[in-house]
Amino acid sequence: MPLRVLDVPPRTRRVWIQSRWLLVALGLATWLDYLTPQSLTMSLFYGLVCLLTGVTLSGRAAVTMAFAAMCLHCLVSPLPNPWYVSALQDVSEFCLLAIVGLEAGLLRDTIEETRMLHGSLRAHLESAREVQKALLTPSGLGDLPVEIAVRFDIAVELGGDFFFVKPDAAGLLFCVADVSGKGPAAALISSLLRGLLEELAGETLGPAHLLARLQRRLQGLLPENTFITCFCGWLDYERGQIVYASAGHDPPFLRRGGELLELPAQSLPLGVEFAETFEESSVAFQGEDLLVVYTDGLTDSRQGGEEPVRRVLSEHQGSCEALTTRLFELLPESLVDDVMLLALRCRAGSAPV
């Protein structure tokens, strides 16, 4: 049964097409060689053809093309006297063409290996990105006596922004953090920090104590010039109060009525310098209050700046989920920095007493 064109693998079909074009180029070079026997030498006619053969096919194919070029040159160019002088020149130019083709073939192989390595690395990073997104996707937040919404986006394959929420019967512990830098290193550090928070959350006396313990556990583990900004808050259901501490994090927004307040950062980021204690503050959290904790990617001037964020926060009257959607609509399609956003508000009819 004859082999149909559609049955040929795409790679083989591509090689056939390239080979035909290269043979056409070889024929054109031979014709030019015949027309100008006295003005150009063999290498000038056929060098480009051998170079293209090495780049598109292989070094072995380029050597074969160089041999074919030498034979064609001998056919179309008369041999001067003494003939052996021309023969030696042809052999030397054949060696030159073969070297050019082999080098081009090696370059092609290097490019192919680099492309395969890049594809493999990208696949691994995409898998890691999916894992990180799964870890950051909030779950079990709908049963809380407060309305909470979390949204995030990663600028590159992996990022260092993350959140942590741990509710219990008395209240809600929440943290938003930003590891300096981006990429795998920042993602690994954020995973480390998440594990430490899981371990320490139930053993601390409040947000300031939690940050102090994190500082001690991270000492000596962070690479040089790496730091972490972190905002930790504790919402006490019974008192209707948020106790919070910040390690150099961007001040969260608290909307109370028509006024937009900020909860300022009191301490340096984790890892900048060792601190035994962190300052702790508190604010009453009333039924209509809306707290927005975010990482600096949200207000980055390259991604829209702070004023549009303030305007949306002042005007928004819907749910926390709708608010996070509106704020993310302010961001460009291609982010230059990771963004993590947590919005918190008491549910209607369930404000803490």
Image (tube, grey):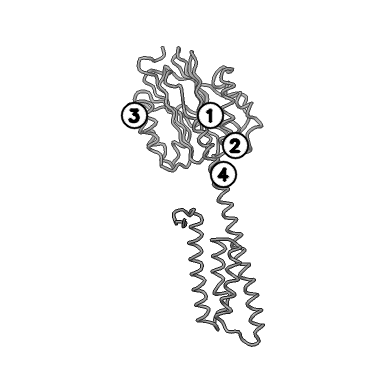
Q: In the drawing, what numbered circle is on residue 230? A: 1
**Pointer 3: what residue?**
316
How crowded pointer 3 is (Cα within 10 Å; few <14, some 14-19, many 20+) is rated as: few
Q: CA distance from mark 1 to mark 4?
A: 31 Å
The quarter of the picture where residue 241 lies is top left
Relative height, residue 310 to residue 12 (above, below): above
Kindly identify the residue that appears in the image at 48 percent across and 37 percent down: 154
Q: In the drawing, what numbered circle is on residue 226? A: 2
Identify the secondary structure beneath mark 4: helix
Circles 2 and 1, Cβ within 8 Å, touching? The answer is no
Q: Earlier in the sequence, mark 2 or mark 3?
A: 2
- Residue furthest to the front in view is 1
Q: Position of residue 39 (x, y in %)?
A: 54, 82
Kindly identify the residue that appears in the image at 52 percent across and 30 percent down: 177
Residue type at tag 3? His
**Pointer 4: what residue?**
121
> 337 or 3, which lies in front?
3
